Amino acid sequence: MKLIIFGATGLVGKQLVQQALFGKNQVKAFGRNVHTTDYLPTGSGEETENLELVQGALFDEGEVYNAIKGCDAVISAIGGSVDGTDKTRTLGMKNIIKQMEKAGVNRIIAIGGLGVLNADESSLLVDKDDYPAEYKAVGLEHKKAYELLNESGLDWTFVCPPNIINEGPTGAYVTKADYPPEENKYKINAGDLAMMMLNELEKNKYVKQRVGISN
């Protein structure tokens, strides 16, 4: 499978690239400053041939279109600050969706946030009065990104993790559609988050759904 990974230099992005290469996929790693040594040790063999570094700006329509064109699927691990001033998550997602539609690429798996999951049948966690104030702004940005995906005609999956820990994959994670999978479990290893997203590309279990995940 040929994949384009946006946000490839971040905590989860690096795990996504490494695991996708290990799975013998062809990978485009998109970012402002991407380097082979971020993903592979010097002197690596076959996997290096399957990695294409794409230096680009997420808001540039032409660069994003050219990166997406010819791929089988898109993975978005784009992030930004949490204070509400950084609109990378929403404006970046808007451009990715637009260029996917133009390029005829239909499958996307993207990272959101815990607040976009359901609190109950009628409301999201981020909309509740007791949602932590320090995460409210970024939660609303994730909500807007989710709404953009939901309004598109794409086959999307929006993975909504809690706190992401800088650890590798264990395979010991749980998932649930639309809701947090377990109460009082608010962390996920970056490696397990990446593993779940790549598994979803193969299994298509959560197409056009949000997904809760935790260790």
Image (cartoon, rainbow, N blue to C red):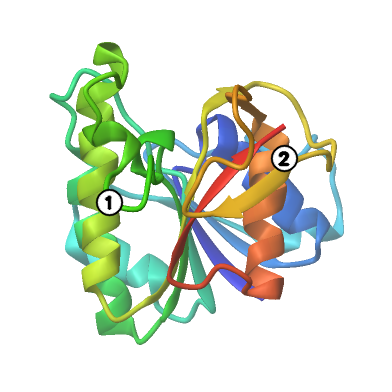
Give SS at disc 1: loop
Disc 1/disc 2 C-alpha distance (Å): 30 Å
Q: What percent of the width, then of the height, locates residue 153?
A: 29, 81
Position of the N terminus by quadrant: bottom right
Residue at the extreme left of the image, as rendered: 85
Q: Which residue is mark 2?
A: 192
CB under 8 Å between callouts 1 and 2? no
164 w.r.t. 36: above or below? above
Nearer to the camera, 172 or 35? 172
Q: Which residue is mark 1?
A: 122
Nearer to the camera, 30 or 109? 109
Residue at image coords 86%, 54%: 45
Q: What percent of the width, then of the height, locates residue 29?
A: 53, 52
106 w.r.t. 185: above or below? below
Q: What percent of the width, then of the height, locates residue 165?
A: 63, 21
169 w.r.t. 152: above or below? above
Q: What percent of the width, then of the height, locates residue 214?
A: 65, 35
Is disc 1 surrounded by few (<14), some (14 to 19) or many (20+) residues within 10 Å? few
| Residue 1 numbered tag | none
Nearer to the camera, 158 or 37? 158
Quarter where residue 132 is shown: top left
The three-letter code of the residue at mark 1 reads Ser
